[in-house]
């Protein structure tokens, strides 16, 4: 079995891992990113239709409170646009009856990214050597060596596909996922393992639906596209359109708990008929739609993520530790950030910390 030696391994190619790789690249440090999926981006996923990218993961950033995101978007030459909120909202009660209500202005102002949130990942990758990112490389085991570590890629119950020896690791995935799916040798302490398992992976239990249309028919009747429903299946809906031209979209979060989302076809039909009830006949006939159930993604969610999380958790490094094994493994990933944890901003914050600490130790 091949064993490759590289100075630094970044495990996870979501925003945090890719941003860490971008920073290492800028400092001319050799590294390799190991990404389990066949794509990069992690919870960022923006499928394309008619040159418009619908965000099935994060769609908003808040320049007023997330300075690193605002700065990075500007540095990379990307363009943001305000979330469309003009007009009246709709409210659906528990009996399904719908009323028009005043719009609920998001505070602070929410912005979307032209090209979808994936544009951020694509642009960061322009400064990362192409062969430094290895897709379809799920890390299953990390063993401490003196010095450094041995990283095995593959499935735990089988022979590893490949192995890497490395001096340093930036572990850029949700701590809960790392504790539940990667074997560490020697064992992580009981305290640390429990702390990692208890950190909710933000939005991992959610599912999102994006419907696209030729015309913004809701806007034409004075509606903003924003709706809240107490009967579902969508619990919260927003305008999910392109900036100034089509396609136009309605985007919603599914309000049904993950364990009950078993029949995608039935759920889709129920969502389209709910959109028709709220916005009228054209809403039932999108030109296309996308659905993503994050709770079913094994490289995002574990079974601990299936129950709904109602409040944004207070995130911090697991058991207060930003690194382990004498600085061999540094935690990144938004759920390890001290500030803005769970958000894109937290993914950048944690990546910066990991890169700075990694270079200094
Ligand atoms: C539906 C939804 C809506 C959201 N909305 C917003 C929003 O509007 N604004 C906002 O700021 N945030 C939002 N978020 C949160 C945002 O998506 C996250 O903060 C951010 O994407 C986390 O990035 P990350 O790199 O820390 O983690 P991830 O994106 O989860 O990246 C982890 C990476 O590790 C990989 N991986 C997993 N296991 C292994 C392994 N064993 N070996 C190798 N690789 C592995 C994964 O495939 C993944 O690529 C939303 C999330 C979701 C799901």
Image (spheres, rainbow, N blue to C red):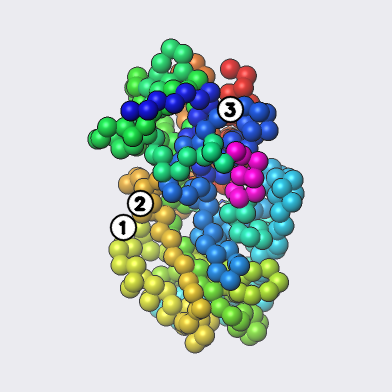
Residue at position x 74%, y 45% from top?
75
3 or 2: tag closer to the N-terminus: 3
Q: Quadrant of residue 68?
A: top right
Out of 123 and 282, give the one closest to the viewer: 123
Residue 259 is at least partly visible in this image: yes
Judged from the image, the secondary structure of the residue bearing numbered disc 3 is loop
**Where residue 266 sits: x, y (%)?**
33, 73
Residue at position x 30%, y 67% from top?
263
Query: Which contiguous range is marked in magenta?
Result: 121-129
Locate residue 361 relative to residue 265 in the image: left or right.
Answer: right
Tell us which disc is closer to us: 3 or 1: 3
Name the image quarter holding the N terminus.
top left
Question: What is the C-alpha distance between the residues marked 3 and 1?
Answer: 43 Å
**Where residue 260 sits: x, y (%)?**
31, 62
Out of 323 and 290, give the one closest to the viewer: 290
Locate residue 265 relative to residue 131 in the image: left or right.
Answer: left
Considering only vertical position in the picture, is 199 above or below 105?
Answer: above
| Pointers 3 and 2 in contact (C-beta within 8 Å) | no
Q: Label 2 belongs to which residue?
A: 306
Question: What is the C-alpha distance between the residues marked 1 and 2?
Answer: 7 Å
Considering only vertical position in the picture, is 97 above or below 4?
Answer: below
Q: Label 3 belongs to which residue?
A: 30
**Disc 3 Cβ-to-ligand 1 distance below 8 Å:** no
3 or 1: tag closer to the N-terminus: 3
| Pointers 1 and 2 in contact (C-beta within 8 Å) | yes
* Residue 35 is a magenta residue: no
**Where residue 223 sits: x, y (%)?**
62, 79
Residue at position x 59%, y 35% from top?
20
Q: Label 1 belongs to which residue?
A: 259
**Where residue 42 sits: x, y (%)?**
49, 48
């Amino acid at each position: 079995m091949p064993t490759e030696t590289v100075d630094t391994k970044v495990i996870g190619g979501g925003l945090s891992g890719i941003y860490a790789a971008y920073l290492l690249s800028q400092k001319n440090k050799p590294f390799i990113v190991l990404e389990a999926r066949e794509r990069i981006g992690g919870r960022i996923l923006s499928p394309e239709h008619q040159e418009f990218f619908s965000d099935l993961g994060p769609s908003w950033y808040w320049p007023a409170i997330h300075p690193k995101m605002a700065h990075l978007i500007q540095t990379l030459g990307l363009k943001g646009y305000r979330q469309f909120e003009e007009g009246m909202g709709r409210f659906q009660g528990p009996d399904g009856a719908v009323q028009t209500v005043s719009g609920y202005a998001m505070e602070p102002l929410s912005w979307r990214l032209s090209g979808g949130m994936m544009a951020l990942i694509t642009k960061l990758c322009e400064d990362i050597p192409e062969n430094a990112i290895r897709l379809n490389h799920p890390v299953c085991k990390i063993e401490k060596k003196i010095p450094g570590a041995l990283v095995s890629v593959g499935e735990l119950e089988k022979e590893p596909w490949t192995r890497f020896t490395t001096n340093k690791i930036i572990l850029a995935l949700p701590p809960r996922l790392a504790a539940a799916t990667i074997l560490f040798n020697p064992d992580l302490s009981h305290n640390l393992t429990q702390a990692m398992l208890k950190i909710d992976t933000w939005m991992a239990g959610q599912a999102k639906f994006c419907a696209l249309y030729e015309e913004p028919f809701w806007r034409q009747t004075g509606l903003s596209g924003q709706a809240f429903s107490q009967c579902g299946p969508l619990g919260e809906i927003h305008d999910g359109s392109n900036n100034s031209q089509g396609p136009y979209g309605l985007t919603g979060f599914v309000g049904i708990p993950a364990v009950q989302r078993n029949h995608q076809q039935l759920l889709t039909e129920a969502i389209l008929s709910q959109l028709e009830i709220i916005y009228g006949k054209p809403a039932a006939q999108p030109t296309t739609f996308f659905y993503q159930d994050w709770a079913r993604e094994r490289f995002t969610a574990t079974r601990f993520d299936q129950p709904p999380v109602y409040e944004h958790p207070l995130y911090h490094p697991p058991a207060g530790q930003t690194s382990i094994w004498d600085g061999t493994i540094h935690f990144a990933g938004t759920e390890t950030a001290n500030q803005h944890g769970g958000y894109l901003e937290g993914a950048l914050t944690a990546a910066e910390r990991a890169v700075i600490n990694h270079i200094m130790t």
